Image (cartoon, grey):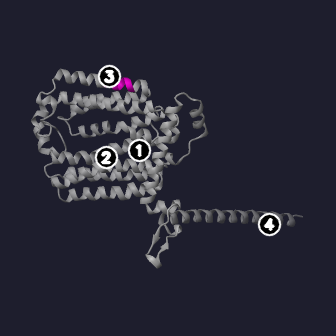
């Protein structure tokens, strides 16, 4: 949720406030707690059969069912109230709807259909969208909101299918209908992990094409980060062992914070200046101190992150011209010419080609006009 909120950029944060940020984050957490509580209430007997869940409080008797119901109702009501009072109707409905989707439809489907995984992925995709809508006043269908939700939705499949494979025997004991439980040789599991890995790898390129992020997100997130994730997925495809499944699972754990940080680092919204209208709101609007402190703090944070990114990325260093990049040693040490950077060079060539085309078209147009004038003059001279 915090990731989605911060993705809205300085223009949105200029008019958002710290209480809105807190309400969105804490409200989402309370709704998630309510959903998880009711899920465990409904699944207590199945959890008792599984090694992974047999020590949960309801299974061991450390917490009574009545107490758990009370906690579920209290967290759900307080989460919904916090979202309602501190954010907007869209964010509030998403939070409350997610409780019903997870504790209701998802929990109901788990022992009945493999499709429960896809329903659960929708639940996991909602929180960052809630952060976005809270920061933007309920803008649900912005390109950024769709990219945020898609990232979390697709990420969950390699993550959960790997976990599902490692604990397939446990899920079978619990009576859950999971892909790995019905996939003794792992063919479908491996295929799904690779397929959704490819889908996930395409998002940085789509994000760049939609101008949500800069082209470097396609390089860092699309090629480098997802390249490794797909490599790990292919190893599991070749050998369907628990060890390789664990590598996929562990990779997914550090992959998500990395891709979120890269998204923020390369977000075009964080390269935009605060508009004059936003500055006016900061001067005249209520809650000025909250809004300005949140914006200033985040601008400072993003500036530090982007600075670190330039230190680590050769292209960013060359393109920004803030850091000298050298090759060779001692007497042979020479600076890298920024024009030789492949990405900078590609941009320069594209601009040069576009300029050449425009110049050629202008010359051809002038020639056509000249020819028409010449023909008109000849016709006039030939007239009796």
**Quadrant of the image containing the C terminus:** bottom right
Left/right placement of residue 300 relative to residue 188 reads: right
Q: Answer above or below: position of 366 versus 102.
A: below
Residue underneath mark 1 = 147
Local crowd size for mark 3, using a 10 Å CA cut-off: few (<14), some (14–19), many (≥20): some
The label shown at residue 374 is: 4
Which-is-in-front pick, marks 1 and 3?
3
The image quadrant of residue 176 is top left
Residue underneath mark 3 = 77
Q: Answer above or below: position of 25 versus 168.
A: above
Residue underneath mark 2 = 155
The mark nearer the N terminus, 1 or 4, is 1
The mark nearer the N terminus, 1 or 3, is 3
Between 300 and 55, the one nearer to me in the picture: 300
Q: Confirm or deny contact between disc 2 and disc 4 (CB under 8 A).
A: no
Q: CA distance from mark 3 to mark 4?
A: 83 Å
Q: Residue furthest front?
A: 330
User: Is residue 79 located in the magenta-colored stretch of the structure?
Assistant: yes
Q: Secondary structure at mark 1?
A: helix
């Amino acid at each position: 949720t915090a990731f989605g909120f911060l993705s809205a950029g300085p223009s949105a944060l200029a008019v958002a406030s710290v209480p809105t940020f807190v309400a969105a984050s804490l409200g989402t957490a309370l709704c998630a707690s309510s959903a998880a509580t009711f899920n465990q209430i409904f699944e207590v007997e199945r959890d008792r059969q599984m090694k992974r869940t047999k020590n949960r409080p309801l299974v061991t008797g450390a917490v009574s069912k009545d107490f758990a119901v009370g906690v579920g109702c209290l967290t759900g009501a307080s989460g919904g109230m916090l979202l309602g009072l501190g954010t907007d109707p869209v964010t509030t409905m998403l939070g409350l709807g997610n409780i019903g989707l997870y504790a209701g439809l998802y929990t109901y489907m788990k022992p009945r259909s493999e499709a429960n995984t896809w329903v659960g992925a929708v639940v996991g995709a909602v929180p960052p969208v809630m952060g976005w809508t809270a920061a933007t006043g309920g803008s649900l269908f912005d390109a950024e909101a769709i990219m945020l939700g898609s990232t979390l939705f697709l990420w969950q499949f390699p993550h959960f299918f790997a976990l599902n494979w490692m604990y397939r025997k446990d899920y079978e004991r619990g009576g859950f209908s999971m892909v790995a439980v019905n996939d003794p040789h792992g063919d479908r599991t491996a295929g799904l992990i690779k397929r959704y890995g490819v889908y996930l790898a395409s998002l940085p390129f789509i994000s760049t094409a939609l101008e949500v992020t800069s082209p470097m997100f396609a390089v860092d997130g699309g090629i480098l980060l997802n390249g490794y994730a797909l490599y790990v997925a292919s190893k599991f495809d070749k050998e369907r062992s628990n060890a390789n499944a664990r590598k996929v699972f562990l990779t997914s754990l550090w992959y998500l914070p990395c891709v979120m940080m890269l998204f923020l680092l390369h977000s075009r919204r964080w390269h935009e200046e605060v508009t004059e209208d936003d500055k006016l709101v900061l001067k005249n609007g209520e809650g000025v101190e909250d809004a300005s402190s949140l914006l200033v703090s985040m601008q400072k944070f993003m500036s530090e992150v982007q600075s670190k990114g330039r230190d680590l990325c050769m292209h960013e260093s060359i393109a920004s011209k803030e850091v000298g990049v050298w090759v060779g040693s001692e007497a042979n040490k020479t600076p890298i010419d920024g024009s030789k950077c492949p990405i900078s060079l590609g941009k320069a060539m594209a601009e040069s080609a576009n300029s050449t085309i425009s110049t050629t078209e202008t010359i051809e147009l002038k020639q056509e006009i000249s020819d028409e004038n010449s023909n008109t003059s000849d016709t006039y001279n030939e007239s009796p």
